Amino acid sequence: MKPAPGSDAGIQEAVPAPPAPSAERGGVLGPRHRALTLGSVSVILLIAFEAMAVGTAMPAAAEQLDGIGLYAFAFSAFLTTSLLGMTVSGQWCDRSGPVAPVVSGIAVFCCGLLLSGAAPTMLVFILGRAGQGAGAGLIIVALYVTVRIAYPEELRPAALAAFSAAWVVPSMLGPVLAGLVAEHFGWRWVFLGITGLVVLPLLVMLPALRRAASGPPEGGPGRFDRRRLRLAVALAAGAGLLQYGGQDLRWLSVVPVLVGAALLAPAAVRLMPPGTFRAARGLPSAVLLRGLASAAFLSTQMFVPLMLVTQRGLGYSQAGLALAAGGVSWALGSWTQSRSGLEPHRLRLVRGGTALVAVGVAATPLVLLPAVPVWFPALSLSVGCFGMGLVITSMGVLVLRYSSPETSGGNISALQICDALLNVVMLTLVGSAFAVLGGGSVAGHAVTSGSDVGPEAFLVVYAAATAVALLAVVVAGRLRPEEAPAA
């Protein structure tokens, strides 16, 4: 199909048109794709388990290593280096394909796990967390590019839905299993145990990955952009300084916040597709929407257990149940968008999904009212999670569709970077506001609080999250490339 005049640079197709079905391929679990799908999903499953489990193991690790004062850096190190890993992976994939980034990412991720699990000091533990972040960044971008190369277009929604579904079990069972392992075997085995489990998925996936995705992209190898790498370093450093300053309420913390913002803002603009932060139509809006929806919903989820404990008197285990149903709902939304019969309506699905996310975010703080039952957040978050399943996976589908073979790595890298970056900025902003209003402090994804926290601290968090979710609704109306005919 010829690109529409005035469409965004790098867009391969002007209109997201559904391809003809190809039943003979047997789906993502058919003989042709089974090994690659199962191996890829298993790797993501283990990364997801580590992400969900680390919050449970971290307090024990920090206490034993005498590193409570460095607690926040164990989280920020992962986020910071993952931004760098995503950028490197995008360029690497555009030059030589996704095989080397996947294998290297798994190796770096495993080295990070081993380093953290065997760490004699908190600084070594943090170094291991940085390795895990870099490895995860390399892997996730390369696997998305693999979907672009190895799967026909009609199977890409299902492949990405499988990636999304891989987070369901870890989100529900990861913290519980990690707690049991830490209690009976020690916190180190939360990290060391995952390392051995990565070998089997790699052995299953690697032959299929080499067959389906070896070599440079169809358009020829892309140019290695050293300027882009320097921007990624500036972005990661800026994000790290922003998190550090946001976790410290002293006036002196303004300095790292300002320096971090000065590094981060121009680097982010240059690393994203042109027009991303003004929501230009097509590819830029798809990248921005992913980040906005994720930032709004993550900040909503993060404060729910604390709100139920401090405002409604629930225990931590009871409060945590409010998040359990969300994983299933998210997977259901992701499965829904993968149905071939709904492909012609993908943009409408995304608009509906962002509306559901906004409803879920805005409705959740109603539990602050005594008349609202304490189980209400489980319902509101399930609604939002279904919307997130529709939106997040669809953005991967659209970015792959809007990318030519030689730009798919860079564009997927931008998608993941925008997601992680807006999460960092959002968590820093709402965490600082929450702390100023008496809610304690935010350390990565863990929130600590005194018993005197008032409802106004939560209202500010959810007001900000609702505003971002409503902005995502607006951006969802700008996904169709410029001058493309209406569906």
Image (tube, rainbow, N blue to C red):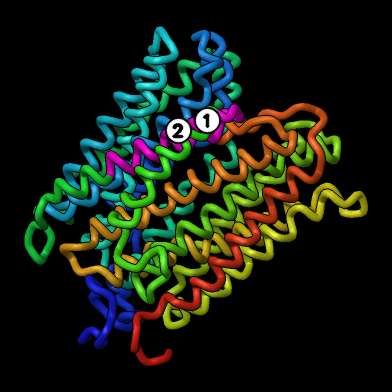
Q: Give x and y (percent) for residue 53.
A: 53, 31
Say which residue appears at 20% left-offset and 63% top-offset: 407
Say which residue appears at 52% left-offset and 22% top-offset: 71
Q: Which residues are magenta?
A: 232-251
* Position of residue 288 in the picture relative to residue 235 (left or right): right
Circle on res. 457: none
**Local SS, label 1:** helix
Say which residue appears at 50% left-offset and 46% top-offset: 425
* Position of residue 388 in the picture relative to residue 317 (left or right): left
**How many angstroms separate mark 2 from mark 1 (CA)?**
6 Å
* Residue 214 in sight in this render: no
**Local SS, label 2:** helix
Q: Which residue is mark 2?
A: 256
* Position of residue 64 in the picture relative to residue 227 (left or right): right
Mark 1: amino acid: Ser
Q: Total label count?
A: 2
Q: Give x and y (percent) for residue 445.
A: 56, 36
- The reply to whether the magenta stretch includes residue 239 is yes
Query: Would you call the spot at circle 1 few (<14 residues within 10 Å), some (14-19), or many (20 or more)?
Result: some
Q: Where is residue 466, by image quadrant?
A: bottom right
Query: Would you call the spot at circle 2 few (<14 residues within 10 Å), some (14-19), or many (20 or more)?
Result: some
* Position of residue 193 in the picture relative to residue 440 (left or right): left
Residue in front for this viewpoint, 33 or 162: 162
Q: Which residue is mark 1?
A: 253
Which SS does the magenta portion mostly show?
helix
Proximity of marks 2 and 1: CB atoms separated by less than 8 Å? yes
